[in-house]
Image: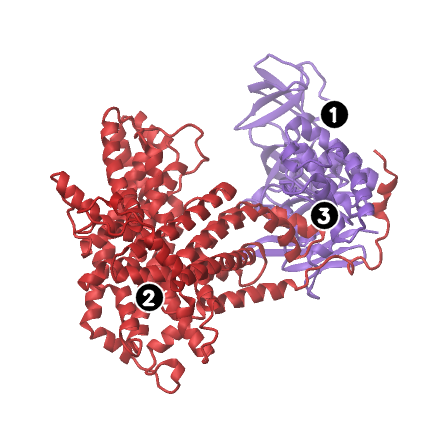
Amino acid sequence: MSDLVITNLTKKFGRLTVLDNVSVTASDGQILTLLGPSGCGKSTTLWSIAGLLKPDGGSIVVGDQTLFNHDSSAFLPPERRDCGVVFQSYAVWPHMKVRDNVGYPLRLRRYKPEALRKRVDEVLELVDLSDQADRYPHQLSGGQQQRVALARALAFPPRLLLLDEPFSNLDAKLRERTRDWLLQLQRKIGVTTVFVTHDQDEALAMSDRIAVMSTGTVRQIGTPEQIYNDPADLFVADFVGTSNLLEGTVIGRSNGILTIKIDGLDQAIHVPSSIDSDGVVVAVRPEALALLPDDASTDGYEMTVNGPVLDRSYHGHHFRYRVGVGEQALVVETRERTDSSHVRVGIPRDGYKLFRPRTATAPKAAQ
Amino acid sequence: MSSSTLTDPKAPPPPSRFGNIKRAWLPEKVIHYGVWILAVLLILGPIVPIVWSSLWSTPLYEGGGSGTLDNFRKLATDPLWWSAVANSLQFAVFATIGSVLVGTTVALLVARTDLPLRRLYSALIVLPLVLPGLVLIVGWQSMWSKNGYATHLLEQYTPFTVPFDLYSVAGMVVMGTVLGSPVVYLFARGTLSSGDSTLEEAARCAGAGPFRALLTVTLPLLRPALLNSGLLVFALALETLGIPLILGTSKNIDMMSTYLYRQWTGSADGGGGVLPAGAVMLLLAVTMLLLLRNRLAGDLARFTTTGGKSSRPANVVKLGPFGWLLSAGVGVVLGCATLVPLSGVVLASLTAVLTPAINPFSLLTLDHFSAILTNPLYTGAIGNSLLIATVGAAIATACIAVIALVAHRSSFRLRGSLEHIVLYPRAVPGLITGMAFFWTFAILDQSGTFRATLWAVGIAFGVRALAMGYAAFYPSLAALGADLDRAARSAGADWWTAMRTIILSLLKPAMGISYVLLFVAMLNEADAAVFLVTPETQVLGLAMLQIAANGLGGTVAALGVIQLVITAAVLGAGRILFGVRPNV
């Protein structure tokens, strides 16, 4: 059992709080992704797990071993944590051959020469680098160096695999291939993995669970589908995927049904919600919207909007239109092509969500 | 890919999983505190007795006495001290102005024009920095003093004459300019070659002529480098002992450093309390200057231009045919300042007498060299210096490496202070470093046995050279990403193991550079030896200084040539092996 349990982790740099009571768990063998913009505290969390940073509060427990506990002053130095870490810069040691890089953690653990050699060969085969064992890092490509770093992290069976933006230095094509490959590898060896990224596509594709972070706090934890389809707040809706955010005003309230007037729309909409603020934000995914021919039925749509096409662009597998709605613009992504300058956009009944405006719900995010 | 063994990662680890991991034999904390305490004791500790004895009525090793300001009162009422201060200030101010003018001009010509032979001039102007300073001074004496060889040739065959007397404050200013210009040059050159020449190109595109662009864009960008190096030269000029001792003695021109030197050598009680009082004053002046410099250097970042190095060659000003004329002028000045004196030293060492009256090639002799090599006093000094340089540079390099690692690669609480401590010797004049260790040893070891060993001299030389070695070593350390040691830590290495196997392995070339520079510095060091040497522990640099102060001779020149040859050989080897470059 190697569940990772992080409770109320807090870290301050001077007066700046970079981690504010972060609690998150990763179940045995699963991939937990820490997702967020730069400066949200995701890397700080990762360094804290690895022991490379000492937090100011909270606890980190793996299985039955406490790595860090502020209250009991327990702090295990990084070398005693058995975490395999893959750094964003790879941090492959340039003065050592691939074989020696991978064998380093084993040598520290006093492996006998033949056992060490055997294990290094195994791990290198696992990452498809058997034929590069006796080369130096500078003779390898970026992708190969990354696999050396991964092999090194896996050499002494780690109890946790920690990945810090591992794909950010690869080009787009290679990134996608490596992502699939790493996912397969992780499934095969089943090591509990914490993965840090600011790339939502990566997060959605790789994770068992995602923790979305912002300004030192966890905004939402859930499966990729929960995060994408049911964002907990405006920040998550905006950060994960793209969302159209339309500002509206509550003009009526009865029996938990709000009547909302969206700027630029004639019709009001009626939504069951418990939001008590006067202003609200309606979030709609661009791909949920549909372009409707004038004679089409509006069944299944909460409402339709007529507006001018502000601009259009072609993205291969879809078209992207910006449609004017009063002062605001609505982005529509659809496979349908239209040349007309005015279109009718349908907003499906369960295709949008209602949020409090940013200032009311997330004062920090607005800073 | 075989996966059978890869279910292993989930297998339960052996129960003794941590017990058998390799560990350094000293815990991290012990190393950190040990290094810090040692650094404080060795670098800051010896200053304490000087300050203390300046405020004490009797010498510290005699016991008794009480706190007093009498020493400072005595110093303040000594007219000789005040004339020394006046001379020092006059010398330092004008040498700084001269250095800034010469250094900047040459830097601009080399980096921003197509001046013919500019690479040669770049090497010539740095020469005084890499060669033993005393040798150059002796060379100037033999060639450019009133009865120097070159002076006579000049007056005999051309209508020109040497416009200054080398044995005057003006002459010393010229000498100081020769030794200070390379410092300014290196700083200015660094800024110019790292700075983007597109800034000037932008000015050109906006309609400025090349010289206008130079005046309105380039020079303002150089301001921080000039301020920084100017302050450094000023501080060095205040503390220098070699120039006033060799050039000023015959005319009784004293500066602060020589005033202290004569207090020590000239009076029975070693100058009494006046000596430490004067030392404290000089120390304060130099420390304040360097603190000011650090403060300014902190603000220098705002002058740093953004963006990486421009890959295009810098925009150069085409000088046209005028270039050769200018080149000839620069060549004559730099040649007269460096090559002529150096050949003077060589000539003086190989002739019975170097005089314009007789063709020197009819007087060729190796007598001076055989005189040195058969005199145990000199061979002893050479042997001692080589020993101190070889062993001392190795120990000092190791210390620098460990100190730098604790200061920059550890989570040690006091790491921030460590860099300031290790750079502090820069602010301590060499004379005072020697004095500080003399008193420290005198107090700690009343029998004087340790003080009579080479270790005593070696430690002082090592501390004196620490800051310079650190400055050469640190950039390489800073260039290594912190992820490299983090990766080792997570792989299971404790702090020291990670440092040893990863960082120090990667820094071997940097340690090589540091070793070479320290070797040369310790081989040629003279100032710090003044108070420390005993007849058995005489060193090369001080032996030269003492003979040179008593007058010129073939012996000094021969000693200088030996010093020159060893220095050049070591630097040359360092250049080939590690790419050693001149460093301030």
Q: Which residue in the structure is indicated by mark 2?
A: B284
Mark toward the start of the polypeptide (1 vs 3):
3
Q: Which mark is residue B511?
A: none
- Amino acid on which disc 1 is placed: Gly
* Chain the render paints red: B
> Where is residue B577 shown, x and y percent of the image?
52, 43
Q: Which residue in the structure is indicated by mark 3?
A: A104
> Where is residue B384 shown, x and y percent of the image?
45, 62
Give the CA separation, mark 3 to mark 2: 51 Å
Task: Determine contact: label 1, label 2, CB under 8 Å.
Answer: no
Farthest-out residue, right: B4
Foreground of the two, A207 or B511? B511
Seen at 11% across and 39% down, the residue is B159
Give the CA separation, mark 1 to mark 3: 62 Å
Q: Is there any visible trace of residue B373 in the rendered image? A: yes
Q: From the viewer's perspective, tell me whether residue B11 is left or right of residue A108.
A: right
Give the CA separation, mark 1 to mark 2: 85 Å
Foreground of the two, A87 or B91? B91
Q: Which residue in the structure is indicated by mark 1?
A: A300
- Amino acid on which disc 2 is placed: Leu
> Mark 1 and mark 3, same subunit?
yes
Secondary structure of residue under mark 3: helix
Q: Is there any visible trace of residue A41 in the rendered image? A: no
* Tint applied to chain A in the drawing: purple
Farthest-out residue, top: A339
* Applied colour scheme: by chain
Secondary structure of residue under mark 2: helix
